Image: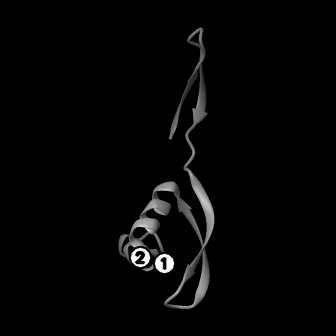
Amino acid sequence: MVGNNVSHSKRRTKRRFHVNLFKKKFFMPEAGRWINLTVSAAGLRTINKNGIEKALIDAKAKGYYK
């Protein structure tokens, strides 16, 4: 997404809004292995709430993860 930085004198310069992504390592107890994922802050909250297995199943169904 793009937008403007607006100074005190109301001058506008272009800026970008970047996605809040993290590289995280998760342990999957059912598989007994670690996986590396790049997830957003909202994705981390989903994983903490539902668990890594359910989050991966939902992500595959939505086409976010292959």
List the single residue furthest toward the top: 9
Q: Which residue is drawn at 36% across and 70% down?
A: 62
Q: Are marks 1 and 2 in contact (CB under 8 Å)?
A: yes
What residue appears at the point 43 percent right and 74 percent down from the top-left corner?
51
Query: Which structural element holds mark 2?
Result: helix
> Mark 1 Cα within 10 Å, few/some/many (few <14, many 20+)?
few
Residue 11, quarter of picture: top right
Three-letter code for the amino acid on which mark 2 is drawn:
Lys
Circle 1: element type: loop
**Residue pointed to by mark 2:** 60
Picture coordinates of residue 8, whole percent (x, y): 59, 11
Residue 55 image-quadrant placement: bottom left
Nearer the N terminus, badge 1 or badge 2? Answer: 2
Q: Position of residue 48 (x, y in %)?
A: 46, 66
Q: Nearer the viewer, residue 39 or 11?
A: 39
Q: Determine the CA span between mark 1 and mark 2.
A: 6 Å
The amino acid on which the numbered mark 1 sits, given as a three-letter code, is Lys
Left of 58 or right of it: where is 13? right
| Number of numbered markers | 2
The x and y percentages for residue 23 are 63, 64
Q: Which mark is residue 66?
A: 1
Residue name at image x 57 percent, y 80 percent: 27
